[in-house]
Amino acid sequence: APNTDYAIETRNVTKTFKGFTAVDDVSLKVRHGTIHALIGPNGAGKSTMFNLITKFLEPTSGSIHLDGRDITRDKPAQIARAGAVRSFQISSVFPNLTLLENIRVALQRRMGNSYHFWESQARLDVLNEDARRILAEVGLDDSESVLASELPYGRKRLLELATTLAMEPRVMLLDEPMAGMGTGDVARVANIIRKVSQGRTVLMVEHNLNVVADLSDRITVLQQGSVLAEGTYEEVSTNRQVRSAYMGE
Ligand code: ADP
Ligand code: MG
């Protein structure tokens, strides 16, 4: 039966690659409007879970549900149209376009159109207004005429986040959004994630446990493809198995 309590639900999902089990019987439940972190050591199966949820991979067994709807047989484009959008690790930024143009392209793609260089002025005005609002959400509104290629690393990641926002996701999947960032940018991105999570669901893979503690409503710990623990940060960080397996105690 459909369970609409959850924005994302996987039921007993297993994924094997030529006999190797990367994801093993994982039942993940992500409540609407929450920030849920997926953590675990390298090779635990976190990225594979993201690929399964966004349908870039087919599960070997089990089912996947979005808003209670079974999406196990759906294609990636259908998942994106249903409002689940993945950011990071897949770059959606065009280096030779300005920030404003990058967001405009993302907005046009959302609306199912290809990029038109010659838009009517009226339509350009509307697109630009939307694009500026999105750039402001991630704090890039001061750089709308800068070429994406000229952005420093941290700001490039923010632009990726902005192109994801342009897709108007109800569910955002963020794979290591702070990877490679300095402490200043980490704090900035954390604030932005908190802000953009209002009214949205966020599933996030993140290695920085301070960020995880700070942002997450709930956490699922994976180890060797299986769920080791699930709960609040307090619960998982005091779990004996988690402490011995993940935190090396
Ligand atoms: P994580 O993101 O938690 O570091 P991954 O989901 O990337 O882990 O990988 C989980 C395991 O599955 C790893 O042992 C990895 O080598 C393996 N794996 C991932 N993708 C493939 C693939 N396409 N073919 C074979 N093995 C894979
Ligand atoms: Mg990974």
Image (cartoon, rainbow, N blue to C red):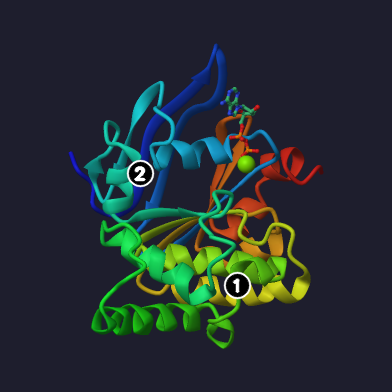
Residues 113 and 38: in front is 113
Query: Mark 2: is the Cβ under 8 angstroms from ligand 1?
Result: no
- Residue at the top extreme of this rendering: 19
Nearer to us: label 2 or label 1: 1
What's the residue type where badge 2 is placed?
Glu
Q: Position of residue 105 (x, y in %)?
A: 40, 65
Q: Is residue 67 above or below residue 104?
A: above
Q: Position of residue 38 (x, y in %)?
A: 56, 49
Instruction: Report crowding for label 2: few under 14, some 14 to 19, many 20 or more residues within 10 A (C-alpha).
Output: many
Q: Residue at x 36, y 48 (%)?
A: 8
Q: Is residue 94 above or below residue 135?
A: above
Q: Secondary structure at mark 2?
A: strand
Residue under the image location 27 percent in, 36 percent down: 74
- On the image, numbered disc 2 is attached to which residue? 9
Residue at far right of view? 249
How far is mark 2 from mark 1, CA to CA?
39 Å
Residue type beneath disc 1: Leu
Q: Which mark is residue 147?
A: 1
- The quarter of the rendered structure image containing the C terminus is top right
x, y percent for residue 50: 48, 42
